[in-house]
Image: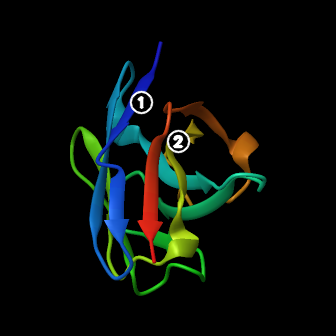
Amino acid sequence: QVHLVESGGGLVQAGGSLRLSCAASGRTFSNFAMAWFRQAPGKEREFVAGISWRGGSTYYADSVKGRFTISRDSAKVYLQMISLKPGDTAVYYCASEGRPFGWGSTGRTYEYDYWGQGTQVTVSS
């Protein structure tokens, strides 16, 4: 069984920064691309950023380009968020792509087979 556990969410003022972490266990983490999604109240879950299994390729939603950075090490995936806006308020989820050795570039939720429980990010104006 794969477990993904997010941490690092919280309340921050507009213009502030947060760093989210996602710890993975249960399978060879380094063989799988990872991604961050978010879901605001009343909205669909949306792709935020993805990183390939080796970490050499990253992908971002247009709304976060230049402000968010995804990275990974041997056991965790991170999302560094700067210049936060109220529109970034959402529950953030990390997800592991279903097939090994992938790119993490897809925004299709069904391509990811394991999800964390989510961490709340609230940006006040």
- At 39% from the left and 23% from the top, the residue drawn is 27
Marked residue nearer the N-terminal end (2 or 1): 1
Amino acid type at mark 2: Ala
Element at badge 2? strand
**Residue picked out by circle 2:** 95
The alpha-carbon separation of the residues under discs 2 and 1 comes to 8 Å
Looking at the image, the residue that sits furthest to the front is: 125
- Near mark 2 (Cα within 10 A), the count class, few <14, some 14-19 or many ≥20, is many
Outermost residue toward the left? 74
On screen, residue 15 above or below 88 = below
Q: Residue at x 58, y 54 (%)?
A: 38
Q: Mark 1 Cα within 10 Å, few/some/many (few <14, many 20+)?
A: many
Q: Could you tell me if the residues under marks 2 and 1 are in contact, i.e. CB atoms within 8 Å?
A: yes
Q: Which residue lies furthest to the top in this view?
A: 1
Q: Which of 122 and 91 is in front in this view?
A: 122
User: From this viewpoint, is residue 51 visible?
Assistant: no
Residue identified by numbered label 1: 4
Seen at 29% across and 76% down, the residue is 16
Give how far across and how far down residue 94 sits, in percent.
48, 44
Indicate whether 70 appears above or below 100.
below
